[in-house]
Image: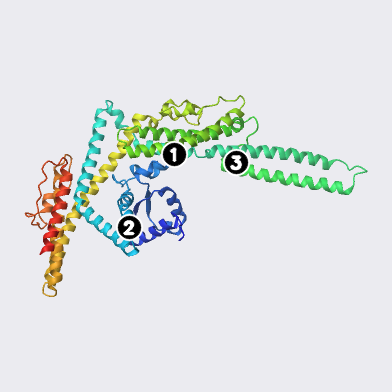
Amino acid sequence: MVNSGELAKYPLAILAHLDQLLPGRKLVGYDIGCATSKTLSRSKLGDRAQVRFVIPSMHGYAHNRPCQLSFHPKYIKGTGIEDFEGCERIFSASNACAAVTRYSSPFHRHQRIDLHFRQWDADKLLSMGTFIADNYKQALTVIAEYRDIFAQVQNLELIANMDFDRWHEEEKVYLVGLRKEPEEETMAIAYVEAIDNLRAAEESFDLKKRTLQRPPQVNQAGEVRRTITLTYKAALDKVNKFSEVVETLEAQMNLSERWDPEHPRYKETKGYMKIRRYRLDLDRLERLVVQRLFELQKGHLESTGYKLRTHLAKHLKSRSEAIRTALNSFNASARALNPSHVNLKFTDIIQHSFVAEFDLLRDARQDIRQKEWSIPSKRILSDQYHFYLRAKEEIRRLDIEIKRLLDWMQKEDKFYTAKVHELRDIDGQLAQEIEKRAEYQKLVNYHIRRCLIPIQSLDGYKGPNIDDLLNELPQADVSSHTVNHEGDANEDDALIVDGLDMVMQAMERLEST
């Protein structure tokens, strides 16, 4: 058996099939969605697939900061408070099957896996009301916390003028820009190098021209004369080539006059070329350090759970190794300068916790220490703002899903009732089985309704009137299935236990009949 691994063709095949089932725009969570989005854009499928990739929340913090700004669900419109880690939960739950099926036959292995996921589906259906209620509570809590934070800030006029979306774009542009030199500087360097090459070629051409114009000496052989002529033509071709390069760059840079050695931009560019390697190494070191500082600040937040802290700590360790390598290259470039710059130690960088403390950023192209999006307190406000937007999206989505869920219950009951009446005279036994299934499903729906009813009493709820929607649904007879759970600490857990016991008792009663 060949283990091909996680090749790019597999997500492309899934997306092609998904596009046939669900045409239109789609939001897809994938651990390496950043790389897959580039692969998709280069494929034939990219022309017609309307896919926006999202990196799951937990995996997102293993990606660098520019990737997080573009693909983390916290910053993407329409994601709500979904973390896109559903596959991880399924894989974690199905791991229990491994010990049971290790020595099973293929048939029994498939049978056990099928039973596991059938039960998984039944459990998720039963807890659907609890899931919606918990998401509603979480979203309303985020909205309330956001309002409380801004209410505690004294200068409300300043807060009102904060442009969080602009900060987000500025940080993204800044970090992406550090990956390579600015285009204007690259063009200026290429132009100055082309001018220097043209000047050297013209000097060489003038020398060959003077040599060719000298009167031939008596003892000068014809072969030597032909060699001088060929070198003259080669020098002329080189002048023409470099002249064309200079003129092309001047057109691209919209220059009205050619730079000479006394031109201010020429002197500035020549000075920059002397420290170019130093600047490139500084850009690389700056990018790694800023990303580490921002991730470190995330690890300090109280809302960061233990698993996410562990995940961040592991990633910060690998980031530190990259910083050490970049620091060695930076120190080598600093020593090559005249006068040489002071070498930095790894401890000089790693001990800082905030961007404002990092003095090296003074020597960078932009000093970001006073940028609003680099100030820790304002970054926290910015994160709360994006969480607030996602929570409002979640509320709007849940209001729709509540109506859809209750509508589905109503249509399902009508379907079962119609089928029972249709088959009662044709196949009595089949009609009886469908009636048992309908009774079981009514009990499940009853439990879901019990979980949905308390939502409308939540502080801040402005969704549909659940009582009016429930009046249109058939009521199940649960008088013989109620279970008392006195002393349960958690009311939601008690509802789930009630539902499970109620359904199990109903199934036993139906089987006995």
Distance, label 1 to label 2, CA atoms, is 51 Å
Q: Secondary structure at mark 1?
A: helix
Tag 2: residue type? Thr
Mark 3 and mark 2 residues within 8 Å of each other at the beta carbon: no
How would you rate the neighbour count of disc 3 (Cα within 10 Å): few for under 14, some for 14-19, many for 20 or more?
Answer: some
Q: Residue furthest front?
A: 103
Looking at the image, is mark 1 or mark 2 nearer the viewer? 2
Q: Which mark is residue 173?
A: 1
| Viewer-side residue, 451 vs 257 | 451
Tag 3: residue type? Glu
Image height of 421 relative to 125, above or below: below
Q: Earlier in the sequence, mark 1 or mark 2?
A: 2
Q: Earlier in the sequence, mark 3 or mark 2?
A: 2
Q: Which mark is residue 101?
A: 2
Whole-percent x and y of residue 480?
7, 55
Mark 1 and mark 2 residues within 8 Å of each other at the beta carbon: no
Whole-percent x and y of residue 3?
45, 57
| Viewer-side residue, 70 vs 118 | 118
Whole-percent x and y of residue 93?
30, 51
In the image, 229: left or right of 15?
right
In the image, 449: left or right of 329?
left
Name the residue tied to disc 3: 250
Q: Is residue 322 visible?
A: yes
In the image, 125: left or right of 228?
left
Whole-percent x and y of residue 10?
42, 57
